[in-house]
Every structure is written in C-alpha cells, then in structure tokens.
Amino acid sequence: MQQVFKKPVSLKDVQTHFCPGCHHGTFHRLVAEAMDEFGVQKRTIGVASVGCSVFLYGYFDIDVVEAPHGRAPAVATGVKRARPDAFVFTYQGDGDLAAIGTSEIIHAANRGEDMTVIFVNNTTYGMTGGQMAPTTLVGQRTSTSPYGRNQGKDGAPIRMAELLAQLEGVAFSARVAVNNPKNLMDAKRQIKKAFRYQAEGKGFSFIEALSSCPTNWGMDPIKANERVGTEMCAYFPLGVFKNAAEF
Amino acid sequence: MAYIEIDESRCKGCGLCTLACSRKLVMMSDTANKQGYVTAVATRQDQCTGCSLCAEICPDVAIVVFK
C-alpha cells in the first residue's frame, strides 16, 4: 500500500481563500506539480498579479514577486534578465492580463521572453466584485453589464491564446480547462509542456486556463463547473494553437 | 485494496469530487466542518479502485489516495 496521490511539495499545506468550486486551486496544484516534476522549486521566482491570484506567495513554497495590476510580464522580464538561471512564471487573471495588462503581455510575448505565463480566464473580474472583463461572454450579466454584455457596444470577448499564438516570439500557446477528468489530464500535460519550453530555454510559453467563478456568476459550484464545459468551451475552444518545438 | 482520505477541515463542500467518481463512492455528508461547509465523505471504500480522479479534481487538494 502506498500513497498514489498527495499534495505537491511546491504547494504549501495551507487553507486557500478561494471560494468553493473555484478552479484556481486546481490550477495552483497543476503548476506546483509541474515545478516538482522539473525539480525547479528552489530556483523558481513566481510573479503574482492583482486579482484572486494575489495571494500566490502564501500558497506556493517558492519566491514570489508581487507585480502592480497587469504588469506581471514586465516584472517577469526584469526578473528573468537579471537572473537567467531562475525559472520564472507569471500567474494572472483575465482582468489583469487581458484588460489592464494587454500592452505588457503582448510585448513580452512578442519579444519572446523566456518565461511561462499562466492566464486564468473566468470571464469576469473575480476579486473586485464581478465586473465585466474583455473575456466576458456576450449576454453574460456582470455587475457592470447588468443587462448582459452587448457585442455592439462592448465588443466580443478576446481569445488571448489565439491572439498570442500569432506572434513570432511565442513558442507555445494552449487553452486548457479542468471541468472534467479528461480535460484536467490534458491541462496537466499542457502545463508541463509549457514548463518544458522554459526548462529547455525554448522561449515564451502561454497557457490560457478556463476557470469557473461560482460566486460572481451567481451559480453553485456544480452549475458553474458545467458552464465551463458548455458556454465557455463553445466560445473559447480548447487546444494547442502553437507548439514551435513540437513537444 | 485502495482507499482515499478526505481532509474534512480543508473541504469546502463544492461537490466536484462527487462528479469525478465514476462509481459514485464519494458523496456529500450532512455535517459541516469548522469552516461551516458541508463536507464530502468517502463511502463503500472496498469498491475504490484508487483512480485518483476525485483527488485530481479537488480544488482544495483535500483528498489523498492510497493504493
């Protein structure tokens, strides 16, 4: 008899502040597992953003820099250039990366900085009270779109994984979800691939992680989990959009 | 013979583990933990295959699996 599943070493044994059913916790674990697999815990420097991911330093047993809202890729650029031996990743939400930090992410990606970006897309500004984000689906009610997102007025949701895949500097871009065991296992593989790109110095790798936000969607965890598979996957297709080194 | 252990104090009662178990061995209990969440419990452990899917899907890493 042996333990076949346990908490990754890179993840601290603490209670998280995430709401019940929020996929942030699952993505934290998958990232920690990838760090364990590559044995880079001791030399990893994470860059946290503003949003529900803000308490990253409390959950990962690694060094973490806290970046201003949206600026995580710019801070990570500095970290990686000052410490080329370090393993650098940013962990950002959609309000942070796709709205406030659009400029930073596009230029960091275009420069092909040797880092990994984990982008958690839950179609809303989770921590600040469920406002409309650039990734909010058309018709979705949020606190700043009480009648639903209007495509004519607010535009259509941004597909970041596809957008970044077009850039020359991006080596790997994929979209994953963890709403069911099949997608979860695939998410685990893709996150490890993204980390492999950095471990082998092959360039910028990007993971868009579709997540639920039961609280701000006004749903119970099971319904919110279902919505990821139905509404979100329909607009944000899962898959690998660029895999330059063909890992 | 496989079995799982659920850390009740960490469980937030989201119920995702009950969906992941194809044999429906993980169910919701009717008791709340210190945080006030109704927690998940493992039942009929003799039928557990140790597939670990309940633990994989748990956002709070509250489940460990032995096989």
Image (cartoon, grey):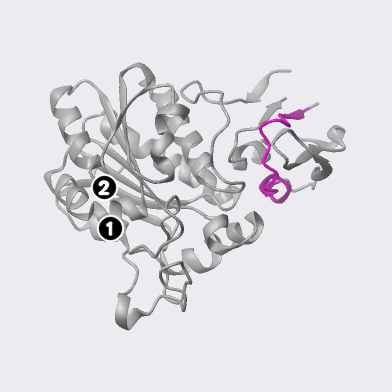
Tell me which chain the residue with mark 1 is part of: A
Q: Say whether residue B8 is magenta.
A: yes
The percent coordinates of residue B60 (x first, y second) are 60, 36
In this rendering, would A94 be left or right of A74? right
Q: Amino acid at mark 2?
A: Gly
> Relative to the observer, which residue lies in front, A230 or B9?
B9
Residue A216 vertical position relative to residue A138 in the rendered view, above or below: above
Residue at the spot x=57%, y=56% of the render?
A214
Q: Look at the image and tell me whether residue A114 can be seen.
A: no
The N terminus of chain B appears in which quarter of the rendering?
top right
Q: Amino acid at mark 1?
A: Ala
| Residue of label 2 | A70
Residue at the spot x=25%, y=29% of the render?
A200
Residue at the spot x=21%, y=49% of the render?
A105
| Residue of label 1 | A99
Residue A187 vertical position relative to residue A123 in the rendered view, above or below: above
Tell me which chain the residue with mark 2 is part of: A
Residue A126 vertical position relative to residue A59 in the rendered view, above or below: below
Residues in magenta, as a range: B2-20
Q: Secondary structure at mark 2?
A: loop
